[in-house]
Image (spheres, helix red, strand yellow):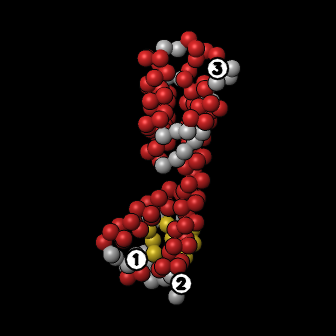
């Protein structure tokens, strides 16, 4: 570890290493092997960089290796986060399409990523209220459902 980041020998145990190690173990729930691979973790600010970026990842349910999370500037981190979110939306779109086709006999015809998120919110409401979307007549045709400007085709 010291060979990869000799500067850690100069850091205070009480004010620097201890709090960062504590955060890594308790909050990040990281593996100590990851610290061995990336000891530079200790050179980054806990309050200004480590905590905010980790919290943002947790908020979106994402994970990223320490080096990818910390070695880049704010813009690059945000770009990586955005790419991960887009991939997650695409995966959810596929899952939603399969789910709707299997459970409700409904097929997604066209939907944007932003509109998909709104549609997912509506789907959650259906689950909470036990409403079947097939029983709703939204839009101008009984063969289509319009959820937040997304077009869903009903198989007839």
Q: Are marks 2 and 3 in contact (CB under 8 Å)?
A: no
Residue at the location (58% across, 60% down)?
Answer: 91
Q: CA distance from mark 1 to mark 2?
A: 13 Å
How crowded is the residue under tag 1: few (<14 C-alpha within 10 Å), some, or many (20+)? Answer: some
Q: CA distance from mark 2 to mark 3?
A: 63 Å
- How far from the left and from the top, in percent, is residue 11? 52, 14
Label 3: which residue?
2
Label 1: which residue?
133
Regarding mark 3 in the picture, which secondary structure is present there? loop
- How far from the left and from the top, in percent, is residue 106? 51, 78
Q: Nearer the viewer, residue 35 or 69?
A: 35
- How far from the left and from the top, in percent, is residue 57? 49, 42
Residue at the location (60% across, 46% down)?
Answer: 83
Q: CA distance from mark 1 to mark 3?
A: 60 Å
Residue at the location (45% across, 23% down)?
Answer: 18
Residue 52: quarter of image: top left
Q: State the residue lying farthest toward the bottom.
A: 156
Mark found first going from the N terminus, 1 or 2: 1
How crowded is the residue under tag 3: few (<14 C-alpha within 10 Å), some, or many (20+)? Answer: few
Q: Nearer the viewer, residue 31 or 47?
A: 31
Mark number, residue 155: 2
Q: Is residue 75 left or right of residue 136?
A: right
Q: Is residue 141 left or right of residue 127?
A: right
Q: Which part of the image, by quadrant, shows the N terminus? A: top right
How crowded is the residue under tag 2: few (<14 C-alpha within 10 Å), some, or many (20+)? Answer: few
- How far from the left and from the top, in percent, is residue 150? 49, 66
Q: Nearer the viewer, residue 35 or 120?
A: 35
């Amino acid at each position: 570890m010291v060979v990869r980041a000799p500067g850690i020998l100069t850091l205070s145990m009480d004010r620097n290493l201890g709090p960062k190690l504590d955060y890594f173990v308790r909050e990040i729930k990281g593996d100590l092997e990851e610290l061995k691979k990336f000891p530079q973790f200790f050179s980054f600010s806990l309050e200004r960089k480590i905590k905010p970026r980790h919290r943002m990842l947790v908020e979106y349910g994402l994970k990223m290796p320490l080096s990818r999370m910390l070695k880049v500037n704010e813009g690059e981190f945000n770009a990586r986060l955005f790419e991960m979110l887009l991939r997650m939306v695409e995966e959810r779109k596929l899952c939603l399409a399969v789910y709707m086709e299997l459970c409700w006999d409904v097929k997604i015809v066209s939907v944007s990523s932003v509109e998909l998120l709104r549609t997912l919110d509506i789907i959650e409401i259906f689950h909470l209220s036990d409403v079947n979307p097939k029983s709703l007549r939204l839009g101008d045709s009984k063969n289509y459902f319009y959820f937040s400007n997304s077009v869903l085709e009903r198989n007839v």
